[in-house]
Image (tube, grey):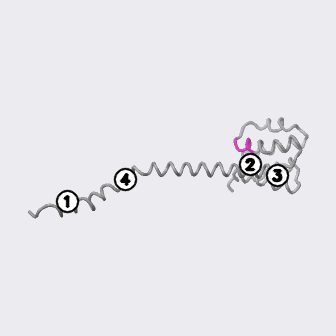
Amino acid sequence: MSAPDTALMLDLLGAMIQSGTSLPAAVATLAQVAEAGSRERLDKVASALQLGTEWHTAWGLVGRDTRLDEIQEALRFGAATGAPSAAILYAQADQLRRRRRQEAERRAATLGTRLVLPLGLCALPSFISLGIVPVLISLLPDL
């Protein structure tokens, strides 16, 4: 089973929190679908939060992980204020997907410009042999 991407993980957390699941239980449930390295870190965070550890301390136990940093950042406001954070999680997931789409569009645009030279070099010999040479031959006087 492949690991879900960060935007999907944020959506899953949002759905769990919106349905009334507590934050530690939601993080523990998310750990079950995460990839191996993230799973261990999320389990540690969930256990620490269930034991009543402060938010920053619980996340400080797991070290640095880019995917988890984005999740931690999205959950930080709700954990600090106690406000429902499902809308924040959904917005963060949408923003992440939008950034990914813009990056893909940018890479696709640069690919088009990079392909012009090789395609032109491949098409040039056929253009010369099928387009220019017959015209030149037809313009030559009969020998």
Label 4 neighbourhood size at 10 Å, few (<14), some (14-19), many (20+)? few
Q: Is residue 55 left or right of residue 138?
A: right
Q: Is residue 130 left or right of residue 142?
A: right
Label 1 neighbourhood size at 10 Å, few (<14), some (14-19), many (20+)? few
The image quarter containing residue 57 is top right
Q: Which residue is mark 2?
A: 92
- SS for callout 3: helix
Q: Which residue is mark 1?
A: 136
Label 3 neighbourhood size at 10 Å, few (<14), some (14-19), many (20+)? many
Q: Residue furthest right?
A: 52
Q: Which residues are magenta?
A: 66-70
Sequence-earlier tag: 3 or 2: 3
Q: Amino acid at mark 4?
A: Gly
Mark 3 in CB contact with mark 1 (< 8 angstroms):
no
Mark 4 in CB contact with mark 3 (< 8 angstroms):
no
The C terminus lies in quadrant: bottom left
Sequence-earlier tag: 1 or 2: 2
Q: Amino acid at mark 2?
A: Gln
Residue 86 badge: 3
The N terminus lies in quadrant: bottom right
Q: Nearer the viewer, residue 52 or 18?
A: 18
Report, in whole angstroms, how far the alpha carbon at label 3 lies from the one at label 2.
10 Å
Report, in whole angstroms, how far the alpha carbon at label 4 lies from the one at label 3.
51 Å
